[in-house]
């Protein structure tokens, strides 16, 4: 018997991607339900070769749902995830609300799959921030080999990480520049077309932004609390795909060749690293793909046991929707959940 899966936030960028990936991976679901706010009720979403009518979240009975993929923002998750979990469904949440809760596992399956077993305290599992997810996939195998002490990362994050309105803003601003129209700023604090913005999320008292803080804290929780990490997160005029320039300092020696071989063998990683024009991956090539791509692996001569690399992934997939579905697959493969008995 298959599972019943609910996708909350089905009309958003990530929700639609969740439906696509459930179909692509032949997820063992007997029934998939698309849910969103009341204003989206009746809209249609594609699921494989089927069309799903969106139902309203606030009227839905979750008592026979096995897995709920939640991608409707922090406020909705804060209110609804505990209610849905209390009805027996396991909630896999894409917002930041539950990530640092000590009773909620924060999981990237290639990195800390064993942590999924801790879901029973609240029936909630958290998905990490999109920029953190791809980073830890690349860091984990190297940490296992040589023990990471410190990471310095600069991100180049696409506008899709800020939602559909942000993608529309980049499109409309780009069009306005070419047609000499008015460039309207709504979603971002400055113009994003043909520009970069060194701010993602709000500023905190120490001068870091919330996005940068998330990367620091989530990496510690997922990978190792001893790792020191500092980040500068930048929004760039790219529609899909986050890129990261990553500088790593290790406890123990590790050569470029060793790192390359370790990453080639690591789950979720794909190394494309030729020292020639175009011998690396950009977000354009990563869009629509599942892998975390790693390029530009080289020695950092300014520290002992240092490496640098370039890490790229589709933020809507590995950074959000794919990771959530991989978590659900982990629960099933490890026999941590059973499909509820359906009424005859």
Image: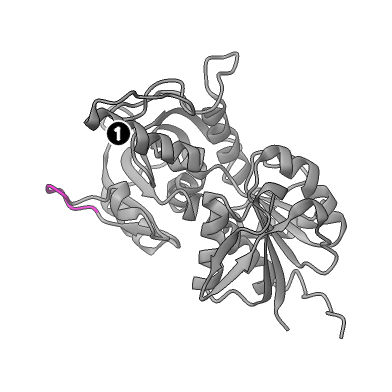
Q: Position of residue 152 (x, y in %)?
A: 41, 30
Query: At 44% from the left edge and 60% from the top edge, which residue is drawn?
Result: 268
Where is 42 relative to 204, above or below? below
Q: Can residue 260 be seen at all in this image of the molecule?
A: yes
Query: At 61% from the left edge and 49% from the top edge, which residue is drawn?
Result: 127
Work out which quarter of the rendered image holds the N terminus and state it: bottom right
Work out which quarter of the rendered image holds the C terminus and state it: bottom right
User: In the image, is residue 276 part of the stretch drawn in magenta?
Assistant: yes
Q: Position of residue 27 (x, y in %)?
A: 59, 74
Q: Position of residue 162 (x, y in %)?
A: 50, 37
Q: Can residue 246 be seen at all in this image of the molecule?
A: no
Q: Is residue 56 left or right of residue 262?
A: right
Q: Quadrant of residue 194?
A: top left
> In front: 184, or 267?
184
> In front: 83, or 264?
83
Q: How many numbered circles are shown? A: 1
Q: Is residue 281 left or right of residue 37?
A: left
Q: Quadrant of residue 56?
A: bottom right
Query: At 33% from the left edge and 35% from the top edge, which residue is drawn?
Result: 237
Q: Which residue is mark 1?
A: 174
Where is 297 relative to 323, above or below? above
Crowding at dot 1, Cα within 10 Å, few <14 / some 14-19 / many 20+, comes out as: some
> In front: 260, or 255?
260
Q: Quadrant of residue 151?
A: top left
- The residue positioned farthest toward the left in the image shown: 276
User: In the image, is residue 257 part of the stretch drawn in magenta?
Assistant: no
Residue extent of the magenta highlight: 273-278
């Amino acid at each position: 018997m298959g599972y019943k899966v609910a996708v909350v936030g089905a009309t958003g960028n990530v929700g639609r991607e969740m439906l696509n990936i459930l179909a692509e991976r032949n997820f063992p679901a007997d029934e998939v339900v698309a849910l969103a706010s009341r204003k989206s009720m009746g809209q249609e979403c594609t699921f494989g070769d089927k069309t799903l009518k969106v139902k309203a979240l606030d009227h839905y009975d979750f008592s026979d749902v096995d897995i709920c993929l939640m991608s409707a923002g922090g406020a909705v998750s804060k209110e609804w995830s505990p209610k849905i979990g209390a009805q027996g469904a396991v909630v896999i949440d894409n917002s930041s609300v539950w990530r640092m809760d000590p009773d909620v596992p924060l999981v990237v399956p290639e990195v800390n799959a064993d942590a999924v077993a801790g879901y029973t305290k609240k029936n909630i599992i958290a998905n990490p921030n999109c920029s953190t997810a791809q980073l830890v996939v690349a860091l984990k195998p190297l940490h296992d080999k040589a023990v990471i002490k410190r990471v310095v990362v600069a991100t180049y994050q696409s506008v899709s990480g800020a939602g559909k309105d942000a993608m529309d803003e980049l499109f409309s601003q780009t069009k306005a520049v070419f047609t000499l129209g008015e460039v309207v700023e709504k979603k971002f604090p400055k113009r994003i077309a043909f520009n970069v913005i060194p701010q993602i999320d709000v500023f905190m008292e120490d001068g870091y932004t919330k996005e940068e803080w998330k990367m620091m804290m989530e990496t510690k929780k997922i990978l190792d609390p001893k790792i020191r990490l500092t980040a500068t997160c930048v929004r760039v005029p790219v529609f899909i795909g986050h890129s990261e320039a990553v500088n790593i300092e290790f406890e123990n020696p590790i050569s470029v060749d060793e790192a390359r071989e370790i990453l080639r063998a690591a789950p979720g990683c794909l190394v494309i690293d030729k020292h020639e024009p175009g011998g690396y991956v950009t977000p354009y090539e990563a869009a629509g793909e599942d892998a975390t791509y790693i390029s530009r692996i080289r020695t950092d001569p300014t520290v002992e046991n240092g490496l640098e690399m370039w890490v790229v992934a589709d933020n809507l997939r590995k950074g959000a929707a794919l990771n959530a579905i991989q978590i659900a697959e982990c629960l099933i493969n490890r026999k941590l959940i059973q499909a509820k008995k359906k009424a005859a």
